[in-house]
Amino acid sequence: MGAKTAAAKAGRKKRDTKQLWAFGFCLPNIVFFIIWFVIPAAIGLMYSFTNYNGFKKMDFVGLSNYQKLFRDRDFYMALLRTMLYTVVSVPLIYIVSLLFGLLLSAEKIHGMPILRVLVYWPVLLSAIMVGLVWRWLFGETFGFINYVLQAMGGSGVHWATNSTAAFFTTIIASVWSGCGTNMLIFIGALKQISVEQIEAARLDGANRWQIFLHVKLPELRPVSFMVILLSMINSFKVFAMVQSLTNGGPGTATTYMIQYIYTTGFTKNKVGYASAASMVLFLILMILSIIQTRATSKQD
């Protein structure tokens, strides 16, 4: 019994040591998370109950900001535009990322690493740089795309002054810059699928489409959930790329939620009101995440 007790104590001590090492490696991330997320979130929540404008002393106004917010037409329009942007961009990012993942997961094609780098490299650019690149491409008087259209005998598109055209420029830019990381995630997941499953499906007479639909796609369900969820959260948080590409215009056609919050807080000096809008956006994202998580759990 003494030997067993000593062995058990040694085992617990070993586990405790491993846990301490794990906690030590995680500690820097925990500290940064608290400094850059928890504390600012708490400050933002506090500001949302005040009339703080960034300069004068704060006065507590209770739920007044939230009451005004839910009567604010501009807030609802920004939220509606953001939801439309999400509904269009997220499926496109998912489909394009999955297609690239399927095409570039094979090792037999010559030059495959180079092709992967070419698809991935937009991720390395800052969001502002992405916006500037596509602003140059979609420029009305100096843009490359209008130059090509006019060279082919067509007429240039009013990318910056047409609300629909401006909306789709933000969609194209977001897909171009967002599919690289997701492509790598899909490539990694595709390589984890058992070769025996695919071979068994082929022996049963399944073609490539059937193998994808009944073998690969079900195996990619957890990864697909993660990609869709992260893409949805990122689409609700889009700011720098749109700010440098369209500056929220024409008018407010591409003014999404973060642009609305930024303009309200830093241009109109309504920091407390903008903080209330931020808290509402946080709740929306949290609810969407919970719904998707539960839906995926039920499917599994």
Image (cartoon, grey):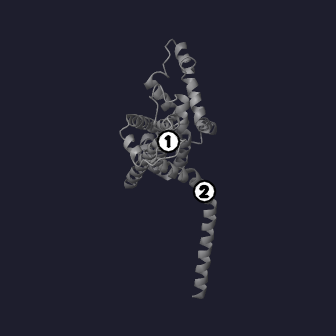
The amino acid at mark 2 is: Val
Say whether residue 202 is visible: no
Between 210 and 113, the one nearer to me in the picture? 113
The residue that disc 2 covers is 31
* Residue 220: percent from left, percent from top: 47, 48
Q: State left or right for residue 193 relative to residue 114.
A: left
The residue lying at 56 percent from left, 44 percent from top is 184
Q: Relative to 216, does residue 255 appear above or below in the rendering?
A: above
Residue 174 in the image: state x and y as whole percent.
Answer: 51, 34
The outermost residue toward the bottom is 1
Where residue 265 appears, x then y in whole percent?
50, 39
Towards the viewer: 71 or 37 = 71
Instruction: Tell me what residue is drawn at x 56 percent, y 42 percent.
Output: 181
Q: What residue would you read off at disc 1?
A: 271
The answer for how far apart the CA atoms under marks 1 and 2 are is 26 Å
For residue 84, the mark is none
The extreme left residue here reads 71
Secondary structure state at the residue bearing disc 2: helix
10 Å neighbourhood of mark 2: few (<14), some, or many (≥20)?
A: few
Name the residue type under label 1.
Val
Are the residues tagged 1 and 2 within 8 Å (C-beta)? Answer: no
